[in-house]
Image (cartoon, coloured by chain):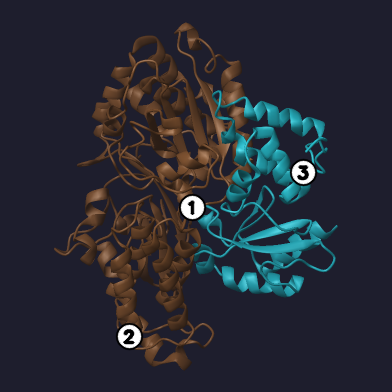
Amino acid sequence: MTTETKPTIQFTPDRLEKAKEIIARYPEGRQKSALLPLLHLLQEQEGWTPAEGMDYVAGLLQIEPIEVYEVATFYTMFHINPVGKHVIEYCRTGPCCLMGGEEVYAHLRQRLGIEAGQTTVDGQFTIKEVECLAACGMGPVFQVREKYYTNLTNERVDEIIDELSK
Amino acid sequence: MAIKVLTEHINVPGIETFDVYRKQGGYTAVEKALKTMTPDEVVEEVKKSGVRGRGGAGFPMGMKWSFLAKPEGVPRYLVCNADESEPGTFKDHYLMKTIPHLLIEGMIVSSFALGANKSFIYVRGELMYVIHILEKAIAEAKAAGFLGKNILGSGYDLELVVQPGGGAYICGEETALLESLEGKRGNPRNKPPFPAVKGLYQCPTVVNNVESIATTSWIVNHGGDAYAAIGIGRSTGTKLISASGHINKPGVYEIELGLPVEDFIYADEWCGGIRPGHKLKAVVAGGSSVPILPANLILKLGNGDKRLMSYESLSEGGFQTGTMLGSGGFIVFDETACIVRNTWNFSRFYHHESCGQCSPCREGTGWMEKVLHRIEYGHGNQHDIDLLVDVARRIEGNTICPLGDAAAWPVASAIRHFRDEFEWHITNPHEATQPGAVFKGDMALV
């Protein structure tokens, strides 16, 4: 290769600053420890973790792209395929189910007209099933980005969807 | 009034801020330790306290600390395990978001005791909002001189780093957590070497749970003997219990170890009883991994005495009639709960969360999920129950990390205590698959 190609995806200047600050947290030679935080930063910027973005992160950390891919595909939080504007991460684990989690989940799917792993045609919502979110005393629970929505009922789900649709 | 080691000030308005926390006596343990004690003296107090690992394993914390290798010129690390992901467990989440400085103070005291100058708090990535709370608390503590260089003029330096996980239950296993912290997939390591010798970056490392670390401030302030005076026998101190399921008051409760299980479930101070019009069928007392017990066995021991909330009493009777305190994830089931469905649900969890490194776990969890699914959905056959027992037995003890055991125990115990219910699903598939159908055998409901 004779010419340096500019990555198609890069961090915005403020995120690049943040990325440098994160990398500096670890001992010398251990910059790979910044991988998960940087993948979160990438997903926060792009909405998911596209391959071009992962290659860019590999460059920042001076590691091979495969080292990023193998990590991004191991951890369930990273969306390695495009997703809707709002990803509803719905807890499907036992304690939430005891509190009516399965009935509320059926209502959510019906309301949005999609199943787990699908995105609404308008690109607004994706449903993703997740395991226990450590909020069992407030079940049923789902999460959208950083926010936990707790003690869900069918009515509450409708309100949240209406709110997020605005 | 029961003693509160961790939650005494948790309802004080503004307790998440440094100023309010400090006014309630916060950071006095840092002052006491750094100004008047040697690191070994802090370790000694923690040993005397008898406090045991609150993440689930229950290993004595002071002893774990004493295993830390201290070769010259090699950095040592303290890593806080805040990857709380065991179904039914949400105490660390609650503690960190509500009173973050309690963890920060404990991290400083514990890092000082272990001689660590850079310590990590590994928080499950889903709790990104809690990570922001912790980072704010760290910045406040640093501004007040409790973190950074030469803390309180003691010559001791400490930097705290909050690390997000990426969504993987397995990273709650300490060596998987260290792999993850190094930016890798969360595959548990073979042991030995143990982290105390070769941990993070191949350096001596201690990994402790949030609740364990948060306890150390009280121990420094009041002494290990005072802590050991709380609780019962070798179950010293208090424990945070995450209560969920069919109870009137789900939530996180700090109990003195030794409280009768019956009081915890029925008294208004804690769970407030089973929801109106229903009866207790079963309990998973220590997070999804521990054996499920039917109502009569969780409330009483074989000799008719009350079972207590302690490491020893909960495990009394072994796996035949007992269970474990585990992480304190206390899940309560009333008579509307289907044990087969819940067991299938938990099996799906372990199958999903298996890292895939060891074949007994990778394959076995998948088999258990598949067989349980077909029983639950009316396609089970007579051999399936024995098949499940066999698969569980072949996983248990045959994997690098305890996830295999954690996957096997719920299945084996559900069959041990609720075999009739599994058989009913197989012999009455039509009835069992009707919406809301639940087995009504002659089991004791309380």
Q: Position of residue B187 (x, y in %)?
A: 45, 49
Tell me the subunit letter for badge 3. Answer: A
Residue holding disc 2: B383
Q: Kindly identify the residue that appears in the image at 32 percent across and 68 percent down.
A: B392
Contact, mark 1 vs mark 2 (Cβ under 8 Å): no
Q: Nearer the viewer, residue B278 or A103?
A: A103
The label number, if any, that marks residue B169 in the structure image: 1
Provide the letter of the chain coloured brown: B
Tell me the subunit letter for badge 2. Answer: B
Residue B445 in view = no
Q: Where, quadrant-wise, is the C terminus of chain B in this rendering?
A: bottom left
Q: How many marks?
A: 3
Tag 1 secondary structure? helix
Residue B54 in view = yes
Q: How far apart are labels 1 and 2 at the CA level? A: 31 Å
How packed mark 1 is, by other alpha carbons closer than 10 Å (few <14, some 14-19, many 20 or more), is many
Q: Position of residue B41 (x, y in %)?
A: 29, 18
- Seen in the picture, residue B138 relative to B243 is either above or below; the reply is above
Tag 2 secondary structure? loop
Q: Kindly identify the residue that appears in the image at 77 percent across and 59 percent down.
A: A84
Q: Amino acid at mark 2?
A: His
Residue holding disc 3: A45
**B11 left or right, relative to B48:** right
**Farthest-out residue, front:** A2
Tag 3 secondary structure? helix
